[in-house]
Image (tube, rainbow, N blue to C red):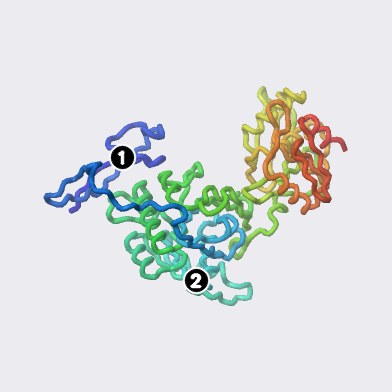
């Protein structure tokens, strides 16, 4: 029987400790250390456990190379069959890359990867490892997603299924089949027999991911891994899991809405914070061709307290409608609520409006929401939030053909933002005629009347002039 030794691993940061502490020494989390039993490698008889090398020993051959000495190997990205997924990945699937996909249960992670596998299988060999479902369950879902409305059966191509949780069997199958793309659904269900801990533990997730990564890099297999998330929304397991992979994607969405957002938070082969938009239909997930129309709302119906901004997710500009409601409070302390906007950002803007502009909001309830369920975290939405709040307070209409772009400073100034030209061109495509932007960033765009302002009070006066 193999010898084992016990160590303690933190289930938040993955730090190791030889003894138990009530508080992790690294991340300072309480009651996060979990005991794990690891096998101890036996030391060969007569062989020292450690050998100290002399710094004056014989010189070793030089292994480091200059950038000129390293040969270029141009890599052709593999199209996934979905333009929105390719956009988030940076232009397609990179051979030998390791992609981690996380999201809430039932959000559509398995549906997206099965649809992608079906598209790739028409021209490549694809292996789908279903560690949480049987082969019959996956086939039933594949038939539902690929069957034509007339009832015609779809071509399965070179799509292979493997219902397995044992890591050694999966590695052997990957080496034998040598697929172009492989999907692991999910990493928390895999089991390495060399470890005594249960599947889904910190050590199991870390060791299984490391073994799959080594094989993917050596055999040039593009590997997609599904990861569970915690109740806080972060990917379950040690943080080192996100450091091991090349790309980390989050699948987001409101369970009361049909659209889904695919967001990249790490990408070694492309821009981060790219956004892909899908819609859940009867045939699975469908791409949204014009996502700005989803977040724009109804422009024909004019209501006080509505302003339009242009947010940027990675390299994609999105026109978003902001809605605000300001009303007298019935309680001693006013209520503030946000949907799609950072709460602390709203509190800061309300303080600036009261201190610098003189709008009495300290005894009024304030509600701000972004249409379509998009989370807008960038400061470029500040100007739109401020104008929407003031418009609701004064019960005034904002021109539906006006977009507002700018960051609001604590002194009441309108600060510059990035990618302004890209934002304005997206506004022109959707038929907007006017734009209020920070002073010093005035850009000439044909068909768009651009107003540059330096102070928030000037922007409010221009927006509510009509």
Residue on which the image places disc 2 = 124
Residue on which the image places disc 1 = 8
Between 286 and 87, the one lying in front of the other is 87
Q: In x, y percent, where is residue 447? A: 83, 50
Q: Is 431 on the left-hand or right-hand side of 125?
A: right
> What element does badge 2 sit on?
loop
The residue lying at 54 percent from left, 47 percent from top is: 265
Work out how far the residue at label 1 is from the one at label 2, CA to CA, in angstroms: 43 Å
Q: In x, y percent, where is residue 11? A: 38, 41
Determine the image quadrant of residue 364.
top right
User: Is residue 306 among the parts visible in the rendering?
Assistant: no
Q: Is 459 on the left-hand or right-hand side of 316?
A: right
Residue occupying the far bottom of the picture: 152
Q: Is 8 on the left-hand or right-hand side of 345?
A: left
Between 175 and 302, the one lying in front of the other is 175
User: Is residue 177 among the parts visible in the rendering?
Assistant: yes
């Amino acid at each position: 029987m193999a010898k084992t030794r016990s160590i303690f691993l933190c289930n938040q940061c993955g730090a190791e400790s030889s003894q138990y502490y009530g508080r992790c020494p690294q991340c300072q989390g309480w009651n996060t250390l979990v005991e794990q039993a690891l096998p101890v490698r036996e030391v060969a008889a007569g062989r020292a456990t450690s050998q100290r090398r002399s710094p004056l020993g014989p010189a070793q051959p030089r292994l480091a190379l200059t950038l000129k000495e390293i040969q270029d190997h141009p890599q052709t990205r593999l199209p996934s069959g979905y333009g929105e997924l390719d956009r988030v990945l940076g232009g397609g699937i990179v051979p030998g890359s390791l992609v981690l996909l996380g999201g809430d249960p039932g959000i559509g992670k398995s549906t997206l990867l099965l649809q992608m596998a079906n598209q790739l299988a028409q021209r490549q060999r694809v292996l789908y490892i279903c560690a949480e479902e049987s082969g019959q369950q996956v086939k039933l879902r594949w038939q539902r997603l690929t069957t034509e409305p007339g009832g015609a059966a779809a071509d399965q191509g070179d799509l292979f299924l493997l219902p397995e949780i044992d890591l050694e069997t999966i590695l052997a199958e990957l080496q034998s089949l040598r697929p172009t793309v492989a999907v692991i659904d999910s990493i928390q269900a895999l089991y390495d027999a060399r470890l005594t801990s249960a599947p889904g533990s910190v050590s199991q997730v870390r060791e299984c991911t490391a073994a799959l990564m080594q094989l993917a890099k050596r055999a040039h297999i593009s590997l997609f891994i599904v990861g569970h998330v915690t109740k806080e929304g972060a990917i379950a397991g040690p943080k080192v899991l996100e450091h091991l992979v090349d790309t980390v994607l989050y699948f987001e969405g409101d369970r009361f809405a049909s659209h889904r957002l695919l967001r990249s938070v790490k990408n070694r082969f492309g821009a981060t914070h790219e956004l892909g938009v899908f819609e859940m239909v009867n045939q699975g997930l469908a791409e949204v061709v014009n996502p700005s129309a989803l977040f724009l709302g109804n422009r024909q119906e004019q209501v006080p307290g509505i302003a339009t901004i242009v947010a940027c997710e990675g390299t994609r500009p999105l026109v978003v409608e902001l809605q605000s409601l300001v009303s007298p409070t019935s309680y001693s302390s006013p209520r503030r609520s946000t949907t799609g906007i950072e709460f602390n950002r709203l509190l800061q803007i309300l303080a600036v409006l009261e201190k610098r502009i003189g709008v009495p909001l300290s005894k009024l309830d304030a509600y701000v929401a972004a249409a379509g369920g998009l989370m807008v975290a960038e400061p470029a939405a500040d100007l739109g939030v401020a104008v929407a709040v003031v418009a609701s307070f004064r019960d005034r209409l904002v021109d539906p053909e006006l977009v507002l772009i700018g960051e609001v400073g604590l002194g009441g100034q309108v600060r510059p933002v990035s990618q302004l030209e890209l934002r304005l061109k997206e506004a022109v495509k959707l038929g907007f005629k006017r734009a209020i932007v920070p002073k010093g960033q005035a850009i000439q765009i044909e068909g768009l009347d651009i107003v540059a302002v330096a102070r928030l009070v000037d922007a409010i006066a221009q927006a509510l002039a009509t």
